[in-house]
Amino acid sequence: MTRSRTLRIDRAVCTGRGLCAELLPELIGLDEWGYPVMEQTAVPSHLQTHARRAVAACPVLALHMDRSTGKGDR
Amino acid sequence: MNTATAGTATVTRLLSGWYATGRPAGLTDHLRRYGSPPVTAVQGNRRSAPLIRALDAAGLTGRGGAGFPTAEKLRAVARERGRPVVVVNAMESEPASRKDQFLLAVAPHLVLDGAVLAAEAVGADVVHVCVPRVRSAQYWQVSDAMDERAAVCLDRVSLRLHGLPHAYVSSESTSLVRWLNGGEARPLGTPPRSHERGVGRRPTLVHNAETLAHLALVARYGPDWFRQAGTPDEPGTALVTVSGAVAAPGVLEVGLGTPLGTLLDLAGGPTEPPAALLLGGFGGTWLPARHLGTPLTRRDLAPLGAAPGAGVVVALPRLACGLTETARILAHLAAQSARQCGPCLFGLPAVAEDFAILAAGQADPADLARLRRRTGLLPDRGACRHPDGAARLAASALACFADDVDHHLAHGTCPAAQRPPRLPVPAATPPEDWR
Protein backbone atom coordinates (compact mmCIF):
# COMPACT_ATOMS: atom_id res chain seq x y z
CA MET A 1 0.00 0.00 0.00
CA THR A 2 1.34 3.41 -0.87
CA ARG A 3 0.81 6.39 1.35
CA SER A 4 0.68 9.92 0.03
CA ARG A 5 4.05 11.60 0.34
CA THR A 6 5.32 15.12 -0.11
CA LEU A 7 8.78 16.42 -0.86
CA ARG A 8 10.40 19.06 1.30
CA ILE A 9 13.68 20.85 0.70
CA ASP A 10 15.66 22.26 3.59
CA ARG A 11 16.59 25.46 1.78
CA ALA A 12 19.21 26.53 4.28
CA VAL A 13 21.04 23.23 3.82
CA CYS A 14 20.68 22.88 0.03
CA THR A 15 23.83 23.89 -1.85
CA GLY A 16 22.40 23.53 -5.34
CA ARG A 17 24.25 20.39 -6.43
CA GLY A 18 21.29 19.48 -8.62
CA LEU A 19 21.26 15.70 -8.27
CA CYS A 20 17.60 15.77 -7.30
CA ALA A 21 16.66 17.40 -10.59
CA GLU A 22 18.61 14.77 -12.49
CA LEU A 23 16.99 11.87 -10.68
CA LEU A 24 13.48 13.31 -10.47
CA PRO A 25 13.02 15.70 -13.40
CA GLU A 26 9.28 15.00 -13.34
CA LEU A 27 8.96 17.00 -10.11
CA ILE A 28 12.14 19.03 -9.68
CA GLY A 29 13.69 21.58 -12.00
CA LEU A 30 16.54 23.98 -11.41
CA ASP A 31 16.70 27.78 -11.43
CA GLU A 32 19.46 29.67 -13.20
CA TRP A 33 21.74 29.24 -10.19
CA GLY A 34 21.17 25.52 -9.94
CA TYR A 35 18.77 25.53 -6.99
CA PRO A 36 15.71 23.30 -7.13
CA VAL A 37 12.28 24.52 -8.20
CA MET A 38 9.23 22.41 -7.40
CA GLU A 39 5.90 23.05 -9.09
CA GLN A 40 4.18 20.71 -6.65
CA THR A 41 5.30 18.95 -3.49
CA ALA A 42 2.93 15.96 -3.67
CA VAL A 43 4.62 12.84 -4.99
CA PRO A 44 2.37 10.72 -7.25
CA SER A 45 2.55 7.05 -6.29
CA HIS A 46 4.24 5.99 -9.53
CA LEU A 47 7.15 8.37 -8.76
CA GLN A 48 7.70 7.39 -5.15
CA THR A 49 10.58 5.04 -5.91
CA HIS A 50 12.34 7.71 -7.95
CA ALA A 51 11.69 10.24 -5.24
CA ARG A 52 13.17 7.97 -2.61
CA ARG A 53 16.27 7.59 -4.76
CA ALA A 54 16.59 11.36 -5.13
CA VAL A 55 16.27 11.81 -1.37
CA ALA A 56 18.99 9.23 -0.76
CA ALA A 57 21.26 10.78 -3.39
CA CYS A 58 21.26 14.34 -2.02
CA PRO A 59 24.86 14.85 -0.87
CA VAL A 60 23.89 17.35 1.85
CA LEU A 61 20.68 15.59 2.97
CA ALA A 62 18.57 18.62 2.12
CA LEU A 63 15.80 16.68 0.37
CA HIS A 64 13.20 14.98 2.50
CA MET A 65 10.07 13.00 1.82
CA ASP A 66 7.36 13.37 4.44
CA ARG A 67 4.04 11.70 5.00
CA SER A 68 1.51 14.25 3.84
CA THR A 69 0.05 16.39 6.53
CA GLY A 70 -1.77 18.55 4.05
CA LYS A 71 -0.01 21.74 5.08
CA GLY A 72 3.29 23.37 5.69
CA ASP A 73 5.20 21.58 2.96
CA ARG A 74 7.43 23.42 0.62
CA MET B 1 -13.30 57.03 25.56
CA ASN B 2 -13.23 53.36 24.64
CA THR B 3 -16.66 53.30 23.11
CA ALA B 4 -15.90 53.74 19.44
CA THR B 5 -18.27 52.38 16.87
CA ALA B 6 -16.88 49.32 15.16
CA GLY B 7 -13.69 50.01 13.40
CA THR B 8 -14.16 53.59 12.36
CA ALA B 9 -12.39 55.71 14.92
CA THR B 10 -9.27 55.99 16.96
CA VAL B 11 -9.57 53.95 20.09
CA THR B 12 -6.88 54.24 22.68
CA ARG B 13 -6.16 51.25 24.80
CA LEU B 14 -2.47 50.46 24.73
CA LEU B 15 -1.69 54.15 24.40
CA SER B 16 -4.35 55.58 26.73
CA GLY B 17 -1.85 56.13 29.54
CA TRP B 18 0.41 57.99 27.17
CA TYR B 19 -2.41 60.21 25.91
CA ALA B 20 -3.61 60.90 29.46
CA THR B 21 -0.25 61.81 30.97
CA GLY B 22 2.08 62.54 28.06
CA ARG B 23 4.90 60.65 29.70
CA PRO B 24 6.10 57.05 29.85
CA ALA B 25 4.33 55.01 32.51
CA GLY B 26 6.52 53.83 35.39
CA LEU B 27 5.37 50.93 37.50
CA THR B 28 3.48 53.19 39.93
CA ASP B 29 1.57 54.89 37.10
CA HIS B 30 0.92 51.53 35.51
CA LEU B 31 -0.44 49.89 38.67
CA ARG B 32 -2.60 52.91 39.41
CA ARG B 33 -4.14 52.74 35.95
CA TYR B 34 -4.46 48.98 35.49
CA GLY B 35 -3.83 47.33 38.87
CA SER B 36 -1.65 44.26 39.29
CA PRO B 37 -1.63 41.67 36.52
CA PRO B 38 -4.48 39.23 37.33
CA VAL B 39 -2.16 36.27 37.64
CA THR B 40 -4.37 33.94 39.65
CA ALA B 41 -7.30 34.58 37.32
CA VAL B 42 -5.46 33.32 34.25
CA GLN B 43 -3.99 30.18 35.76
CA GLY B 44 -5.56 26.85 35.04
CA ASN B 45 -4.37 23.36 34.52
CA ARG B 46 -2.46 22.31 31.42
CA ARG B 47 -5.66 21.29 29.65
CA SER B 48 -7.59 24.48 30.08
CA ALA B 49 -6.47 27.92 31.09
CA PRO B 50 -9.11 30.64 31.49
CA LEU B 51 -6.87 33.11 29.65
CA ILE B 52 -6.71 30.90 26.57
CA ARG B 53 -10.51 30.68 26.49
CA ALA B 54 -10.76 34.45 26.90
CA LEU B 55 -8.31 35.01 24.04
CA ASP B 56 -10.32 32.63 21.87
CA ALA B 57 -13.50 34.57 22.58
CA ALA B 58 -11.71 37.88 22.09
CA GLY B 59 -10.35 36.83 18.71
CA LEU B 60 -6.95 38.41 19.32
CA THR B 61 -4.45 37.73 16.54
CA GLY B 62 -0.70 38.31 16.45
CA ARG B 63 0.23 41.92 15.72
CA GLY B 64 3.74 41.12 14.49
CA GLY B 65 2.69 40.56 10.90
CA ALA B 66 1.52 37.00 10.47
CA GLY B 67 -1.81 37.55 12.23
CA PHE B 68 -2.00 34.06 13.76
CA PRO B 69 -4.66 33.51 16.46
CA THR B 70 -3.02 34.13 19.83
CA ALA B 71 -5.11 31.54 21.69
CA GLU B 72 -4.03 28.80 19.29
CA LYS B 73 -0.39 29.63 19.86
CA LEU B 74 -0.80 29.44 23.62
CA ARG B 75 -2.73 26.20 23.36
CA ALA B 76 -0.09 24.60 21.13
CA VAL B 77 2.63 25.39 23.64
CA ALA B 78 0.59 24.35 26.68
CA ARG B 79 -0.16 21.01 25.00
CA GLU B 80 3.51 20.04 24.68
CA ARG B 81 5.41 18.11 27.31
CA GLY B 82 7.99 20.02 29.34
CA ARG B 83 7.90 23.39 31.03
CA PRO B 84 7.39 26.11 28.39
CA VAL B 85 9.37 29.29 27.80
CA VAL B 86 7.95 32.66 26.73
CA VAL B 87 9.85 34.95 24.36
CA VAL B 88 8.89 38.60 23.83
CA ASN B 89 9.76 39.63 20.29
CA ALA B 90 10.51 43.36 20.45
CA MET B 91 13.06 43.25 17.64
CA GLU B 92 10.98 45.36 15.26
CA SER B 93 13.45 45.10 12.40
CA GLU B 94 11.03 46.53 9.84
CA PRO B 95 12.55 49.95 9.09
CA ALA B 96 9.18 51.62 8.42
CA SER B 97 7.70 50.41 11.72
CA ARG B 98 8.06 52.15 15.07
CA LYS B 99 5.13 50.74 16.98
CA ASP B 100 6.86 48.25 19.25
CA GLN B 101 9.62 50.72 20.10
CA PHE B 102 7.00 53.34 20.90
CA LEU B 103 4.86 50.96 22.94
CA LEU B 104 7.83 49.71 24.96
CA ALA B 105 8.92 53.28 25.58
CA VAL B 106 5.56 54.56 26.85
CA ALA B 107 3.95 51.44 28.37
CA PRO B 108 6.66 48.85 29.06
CA HIS B 109 4.72 47.28 31.91
CA LEU B 110 1.75 46.49 29.70
CA VAL B 111 4.03 44.39 27.50
CA LEU B 112 5.73 42.76 30.49
CA ASP B 113 2.33 42.07 32.12
CA GLY B 114 1.24 40.32 28.95
CA ALA B 115 4.38 38.21 28.88
CA VAL B 116 3.98 37.26 32.54
CA LEU B 117 0.28 36.45 32.13
CA ALA B 118 0.98 34.34 29.03
CA ALA B 119 3.70 32.54 30.98
CA GLU B 120 1.34 31.85 33.88
CA ALA B 121 -1.36 30.61 31.51
CA VAL B 122 0.89 28.06 29.79
CA GLY B 123 2.90 27.16 32.89
CA ALA B 124 6.19 28.80 31.87
CA ASP B 125 8.69 29.89 34.50
CA VAL B 126 10.85 32.22 32.43
CA VAL B 127 10.27 35.11 30.02
CA HIS B 128 13.01 36.20 27.61
CA VAL B 129 12.63 39.76 26.33
CA CYS B 130 14.50 40.33 23.06
CA VAL B 131 15.41 43.82 21.82
CA PRO B 132 18.03 44.82 19.24
CA ARG B 133 21.41 45.55 20.75
CA VAL B 134 21.77 48.78 18.74
CA ARG B 135 18.81 50.39 20.53
CA SER B 136 20.71 50.82 23.78
CA ALA B 137 18.37 53.48 25.19
CA GLN B 138 15.46 51.11 24.74
CA TYR B 139 17.45 48.27 26.28
CA TRP B 140 18.07 50.27 29.44
CA GLN B 141 14.48 51.51 29.64
CA VAL B 142 13.20 47.95 29.60
CA SER B 143 15.92 46.94 32.03
CA ASP B 144 14.76 49.68 34.43
CA ALA B 145 11.16 48.56 34.09
CA MET B 146 12.18 45.00 34.98
CA ASP B 147 14.13 46.26 37.99
CA GLU B 148 11.05 48.16 39.19
CA ARG B 149 9.04 44.94 39.06
CA ALA B 150 11.75 42.89 40.75
CA ALA B 151 12.05 45.47 43.56
CA VAL B 152 8.43 44.86 44.58
CA CYS B 153 8.48 41.13 43.77
CA LEU B 154 5.61 41.59 41.31
CA ASP B 155 6.21 38.47 39.22
CA ARG B 156 6.76 34.84 40.07
CA VAL B 157 8.20 34.05 36.67
CA SER B 158 11.72 35.18 35.95
CA LEU B 159 12.22 38.00 33.41
CA ARG B 160 15.43 38.15 31.38
CA LEU B 161 16.45 40.85 28.93
CA HIS B 162 18.62 40.22 25.88
CA GLY B 163 20.21 42.51 23.29
CA LEU B 164 20.35 40.75 19.93
CA PRO B 165 22.12 41.62 16.69
CA HIS B 166 20.03 43.84 14.46
CA ALA B 167 19.16 42.58 10.99
CA TYR B 168 15.98 42.50 8.93
CA VAL B 169 15.53 38.75 9.45
CA SER B 170 16.59 38.74 13.11
CA SER B 171 13.00 39.37 14.13
CA GLU B 172 11.84 36.04 12.69
CA SER B 173 10.75 33.99 15.70
CA THR B 174 13.15 31.18 14.81
CA SER B 175 16.06 33.67 14.77
CA LEU B 176 15.30 34.57 18.39
CA VAL B 177 15.10 30.94 19.45
CA ARG B 178 18.33 30.11 17.66
CA TRP B 179 20.14 33.05 19.26
CA LEU B 180 18.79 32.28 22.74
CA ASN B 181 20.17 28.77 22.27
CA GLY B 182 23.63 30.18 21.69
CA GLY B 183 23.52 30.34 17.91
CA GLU B 184 23.24 33.07 15.31
CA ALA B 185 20.15 35.28 14.99
CA ARG B 186 19.28 33.79 11.60
CA PRO B 187 16.04 32.00 10.76
CA LEU B 188 15.66 28.24 10.92
CA GLY B 189 13.35 26.62 8.44
CA THR B 190 13.20 23.06 9.57
CA PRO B 191 11.09 21.18 12.07
CA PRO B 192 10.77 20.88 15.01
CA ARG B 193 8.84 24.13 15.32
CA SER B 194 9.59 26.45 18.24
CA HIS B 195 6.34 25.59 20.00
CA GLU B 196 7.45 21.94 20.08
CA ARG B 197 11.13 22.35 20.84
CA GLY B 198 12.54 25.86 21.15
CA VAL B 199 14.67 27.57 23.76
CA GLY B 200 16.62 24.95 25.72
CA ARG B 201 14.62 22.31 23.79
CA ARG B 202 11.53 23.41 25.71
CA PRO B 203 8.17 24.33 24.15
CA THR B 204 8.51 28.02 23.31
CA LEU B 205 5.88 30.71 22.89
CA VAL B 206 7.16 33.64 20.83
CA HIS B 207 4.92 36.70 20.74
CA ASN B 208 5.26 40.18 19.36
CA ALA B 209 5.41 42.91 22.03
CA GLU B 210 2.15 44.57 20.98
CA THR B 211 0.27 41.26 20.97
CA LEU B 212 1.26 40.69 24.60
CA ALA B 213 0.08 44.16 25.60
CA HIS B 214 -3.36 43.39 24.12
CA LEU B 215 -3.27 40.06 25.94
CA ALA B 216 -2.66 41.87 29.22
CA LEU B 217 -5.81 43.92 28.68
CA VAL B 218 -7.95 40.95 27.60
CA ALA B 219 -6.88 39.23 30.85
CA ARG B 220 -8.17 42.24 32.79
CA TYR B 221 -11.25 43.37 30.93
CA GLY B 222 -12.37 40.25 29.07
CA PRO B 223 -13.28 39.36 25.49
CA ASP B 224 -16.49 41.42 25.26
CA TRP B 225 -14.60 44.57 26.10
CA PHE B 226 -11.92 43.69 23.54
CA ARG B 227 -14.54 43.24 20.83
CA GLN B 228 -15.96 46.73 21.33
CA ALA B 229 -13.33 47.97 18.89
CA GLY B 230 -12.51 46.65 15.44
CA THR B 231 -14.76 44.57 13.22
CA PRO B 232 -16.66 41.41 14.20
CA ASP B 233 -14.22 39.29 12.17
CA GLU B 234 -11.09 41.14 13.19
CA PRO B 235 -11.73 42.68 16.58
CA GLY B 236 -9.63 45.01 18.68
CA THR B 237 -7.23 47.80 18.01
CA ALA B 238 -3.83 47.81 16.38
CA LEU B 239 -0.84 50.09 16.45
CA VAL B 240 0.04 51.47 13.04
CA THR B 241 3.07 53.45 11.94
CA VAL B 242 2.13 56.05 9.34
CA SER B 243 4.94 57.78 7.45
CA GLY B 244 5.81 59.29 4.10
CA ALA B 245 3.87 62.24 2.72
CA VAL B 246 1.81 63.02 5.83
CA ALA B 247 2.00 66.09 8.07
CA ALA B 248 2.46 64.24 11.37
CA PRO B 249 4.10 60.86 10.81
CA GLY B 250 4.05 58.56 13.80
CA VAL B 251 2.46 55.71 15.68
CA LEU B 252 -1.33 55.61 16.04
CA GLU B 253 -3.73 53.24 17.73
CA VAL B 254 -6.82 52.54 15.66
CA GLY B 255 -9.64 50.03 15.56
CA LEU B 256 -9.09 47.35 12.94
CA GLY B 257 -11.28 48.20 9.96
CA THR B 258 -10.35 51.88 9.93
CA PRO B 259 -10.10 52.99 6.26
CA LEU B 260 -6.57 53.58 4.99
CA GLY B 261 -7.39 57.17 4.07
CA THR B 262 -8.51 57.84 7.64
CA LEU B 263 -5.10 56.63 8.85
CA LEU B 264 -3.46 59.30 6.71
CA ASP B 265 -5.89 61.92 8.06
CA LEU B 266 -5.13 60.88 11.63
CA ALA B 267 -1.44 61.32 10.86
CA GLY B 268 -1.99 64.98 10.08
CA GLY B 269 -3.33 64.43 6.58
CA PRO B 270 -1.43 64.08 3.30
CA THR B 271 1.05 66.85 2.58
CA GLU B 272 0.59 66.21 -1.13
CA PRO B 273 -1.78 63.90 -2.98
CA PRO B 274 -0.47 60.37 -2.42
CA ALA B 275 0.27 58.38 -5.56
CA ALA B 276 0.31 55.07 -3.74
CA LEU B 277 0.51 53.47 -0.31
CA LEU B 278 3.06 50.95 0.84
CA LEU B 279 1.21 48.66 3.17
CA GLY B 280 2.62 46.15 5.63
CA GLY B 281 6.29 47.12 5.45
CA PHE B 282 9.30 46.73 3.16
CA GLY B 283 8.13 43.20 2.42
CA GLY B 284 4.61 44.49 1.85
CA THR B 285 2.42 45.65 -0.98
CA TRP B 286 2.11 48.83 -3.03
CA LEU B 287 -1.52 49.89 -3.38
CA PRO B 288 -2.69 52.58 -5.82
CA ALA B 289 -4.25 55.61 -4.13
CA ARG B 290 -7.72 54.65 -5.40
CA HIS B 291 -7.81 52.07 -2.61
CA LEU B 292 -7.71 54.70 0.17
CA GLY B 293 -11.24 53.72 1.19
CA THR B 294 -10.24 50.12 1.95
CA PRO B 295 -10.59 49.15 5.63
CA LEU B 296 -7.47 47.99 7.45
CA THR B 297 -8.36 44.32 7.85
CA ARG B 298 -6.90 41.14 6.47
CA ARG B 299 -10.21 40.30 4.86
CA ASP B 300 -10.58 43.56 2.96
CA LEU B 301 -6.94 43.75 1.92
CA ALA B 302 -6.52 40.13 0.84
CA PRO B 303 -8.31 40.60 -2.53
CA LEU B 304 -5.78 43.37 -3.26
CA GLY B 305 -2.89 41.04 -2.45
CA ALA B 306 -2.12 43.08 0.65
CA ALA B 307 -2.25 42.58 4.41
CA PRO B 308 -1.98 44.88 7.44
CA GLY B 309 1.32 43.17 8.27
CA ALA B 310 2.91 44.87 11.24
CA GLY B 311 0.74 47.97 10.72
CA VAL B 312 2.99 49.92 8.37
CA VAL B 313 1.46 52.55 6.09
CA VAL B 314 3.75 54.70 3.93
CA ALA B 315 2.22 57.38 1.72
CA LEU B 316 4.23 57.86 -1.47
CA PRO B 317 4.06 61.46 -2.69
CA ARG B 318 2.78 62.03 -6.22
CA LEU B 319 6.12 63.55 -7.22
CA ALA B 320 8.16 60.52 -6.18
CA CYS B 321 9.09 57.65 -8.49
CA GLY B 322 7.64 54.42 -7.08
CA LEU B 323 10.08 52.33 -9.11
CA THR B 324 13.12 54.15 -7.75
CA GLU B 325 11.86 53.85 -4.17
CA THR B 326 11.14 50.15 -4.69
CA ALA B 327 14.60 49.56 -6.14
CA ARG B 328 16.15 51.14 -3.05
CA ILE B 329 14.06 49.00 -0.72
CA LEU B 330 14.89 45.83 -2.68
CA ALA B 331 18.60 46.62 -2.51
CA HIS B 332 18.29 46.90 1.27
CA LEU B 333 16.32 43.65 1.55
CA ALA B 334 18.85 41.83 -0.66
CA ALA B 335 21.74 43.04 1.50
CA GLN B 336 19.92 41.97 4.65
CA SER B 337 19.44 38.36 3.53
CA ALA B 338 20.66 35.80 6.03
CA ARG B 339 22.57 34.22 3.11
CA GLN B 340 21.50 30.74 4.04
CA CYS B 341 19.23 29.74 1.17
CA GLY B 342 20.25 29.76 -2.51
CA PRO B 343 17.09 31.44 -3.84
CA CYS B 344 17.55 34.34 -1.40
CA LEU B 345 21.35 34.47 -1.72
CA PHE B 346 21.33 34.64 -5.52
CA GLY B 347 17.74 35.30 -6.59
CA LEU B 348 17.02 38.27 -4.34
CA PRO B 349 20.11 40.35 -5.34
CA ALA B 350 19.35 39.51 -8.98
CA VAL B 351 15.79 40.82 -8.61
CA ALA B 352 17.10 43.93 -6.85
CA GLU B 353 19.60 44.53 -9.64
CA ASP B 354 17.02 44.00 -12.40
CA PHE B 355 14.76 46.43 -10.60
CA ALA B 356 17.53 49.00 -10.31
CA ILE B 357 18.10 48.78 -14.09
CA LEU B 358 14.39 49.35 -14.65
CA ALA B 359 14.32 52.28 -12.22
CA ALA B 360 17.33 53.79 -13.95
CA GLY B 361 15.49 53.67 -17.26
CA GLN B 362 18.02 51.28 -18.81
CA ALA B 363 15.85 48.19 -19.08
CA ASP B 364 14.39 46.71 -22.26
CA PRO B 365 11.35 44.38 -22.44
CA ALA B 366 13.60 41.32 -22.15
CA ASP B 367 15.01 42.66 -18.88
CA LEU B 368 11.49 43.20 -17.61
CA ALA B 369 10.53 39.64 -18.53
CA ARG B 370 13.59 38.37 -16.69
CA LEU B 371 12.68 40.46 -13.63
CA ARG B 372 9.17 39.01 -13.62
CA ARG B 373 10.46 35.45 -13.99
CA ARG B 374 13.03 35.86 -11.22
CA THR B 375 10.48 37.51 -8.94
CA GLY B 376 8.12 34.58 -9.47
CA LEU B 377 10.82 32.17 -8.30
CA LEU B 378 11.36 33.84 -4.90
CA PRO B 379 8.26 32.84 -2.91
CA ASP B 380 8.09 29.59 -0.95
CA ARG B 381 11.74 28.79 -1.51
CA GLY B 382 13.37 30.02 1.68
CA ALA B 383 13.77 28.88 5.27
CA CYS B 384 11.96 32.10 6.21
CA ARG B 385 9.56 34.49 4.48
CA HIS B 386 12.12 37.16 3.67
CA PRO B 387 12.26 36.39 -0.09
CA ASP B 388 8.46 36.10 -0.18
CA GLY B 389 8.14 39.64 1.15
CA ALA B 390 10.65 41.00 -1.35
CA ALA B 391 8.79 39.28 -4.18
CA ARG B 392 5.49 40.72 -2.97
CA LEU B 393 7.00 44.21 -2.96
CA ALA B 394 8.54 43.84 -6.44
CA ALA B 395 5.45 42.31 -8.04
CA SER B 396 3.09 44.84 -6.49
CA ALA B 397 5.34 47.71 -7.64
CA LEU B 398 5.22 46.46 -11.23
CA ALA B 399 1.42 46.39 -11.04
CA CYS B 400 0.88 49.60 -9.07
CA PHE B 401 3.35 51.64 -11.13
CA ALA B 402 2.55 49.98 -14.47
CA ASP B 403 2.41 53.37 -16.25
CA ASP B 404 5.83 54.26 -14.88
CA VAL B 405 7.18 50.89 -16.03
CA ASP B 406 6.02 51.66 -19.58
CA HIS B 407 7.53 55.13 -19.38
CA HIS B 408 10.86 53.85 -18.05
CA LEU B 409 11.01 51.23 -20.80
CA ALA B 410 10.08 53.59 -23.62
CA HIS B 411 11.68 56.89 -22.64
CA GLY B 412 14.13 56.23 -19.84
CA THR B 413 13.57 57.56 -16.34
CA CYS B 414 10.60 59.68 -15.42
CA PRO B 415 11.26 63.24 -14.16
CA ALA B 416 10.52 62.14 -10.58
CA ALA B 417 13.29 59.55 -10.72
CA GLN B 418 15.81 62.34 -11.21
CA ARG B 419 14.84 64.03 -7.94
CA PRO B 420 16.31 62.85 -4.64
CA PRO B 421 14.53 59.78 -3.23
CA ARG B 422 11.77 60.45 -0.73
CA LEU B 423 11.47 57.41 1.52
CA PRO B 424 13.95 56.79 4.32
CA VAL B 425 15.58 53.49 3.42
CA PRO B 426 18.58 52.21 5.41
CA ALA B 427 21.80 51.60 3.50
CA ALA B 428 22.03 48.43 1.43
CA THR B 429 24.71 46.92 3.62
CA PRO B 430 24.83 43.43 5.15
CA PRO B 431 24.31 43.06 8.91
CA GLU B 432 27.55 43.46 10.83
CA ASP B 433 26.96 40.62 13.18
CA TRP B 434 24.70 37.58 13.57
CA ARG B 435 25.75 36.73 17.10
Image: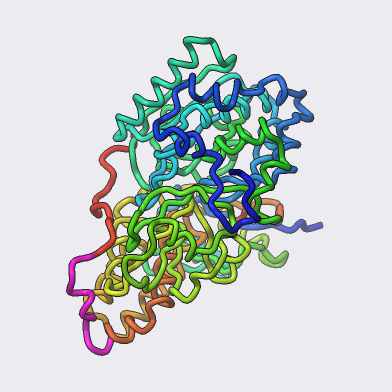
Tell me where residue B353 sits by quadrant.
bottom left
Quarter of the C terminus of chain B within the rendering: top left
B360, B267: nearer the viewer: B267
Q: Residue at x 48, y 51 (%)?
A: B310
Q: Which residues are magenta?
A: B409-421
Q: Which is nearer the eye, B222 or B144?
A: B222
Horizontal side of residue B231 vs B28, given as left or right: right
Whether residue A56 is visible, yes or no, is no
The answer to which of B377 and B31 lies nearer the viewer is B31
Q: Nearer the viewer, residue B179 or B211?
A: B211
Colour approach in the figure: rainbow
| Place of residue B274 in the rendered image (x, y in percent of width and height, measured from the top left) | 37, 71
Residue, x 56% and y 59% (percent of image)?
B258
Give the percent coordinates (x, y) of residue B25.
45, 27
Relative image position of residue B50 (x, y in whole percent): 75, 30
Can residue B217 be seen here? The reply is yes
Query: What x and y, as percent, mark residue B225?
Result: 69, 41
Q: Is residue A15 left or right of residue B9?
A: left
Q: Quadrant of residue B414?
A: bottom left
Q: Does B412 appear in magenta?
A: yes
Is residue B29 positioned above or below B133 on the image?
Answer: above
In the picture, measured across the screen, residue B228 lies left or right of residue B284, that is: right
Q: Residue at x 36, y 35 (%)?
A: B132
In this view, B162 is above or below B188:
above
Q: Quadrant of the N terminus of chain B?
A: top right
Q: Residue at x 32, y 32 (%)?
A: B133
Say how many tags the image has: 0
- Residue B38 sits above or below residue B168 on the image: above
Q: Is residue B107 left or right of B316 when viewed as pictured? A: right
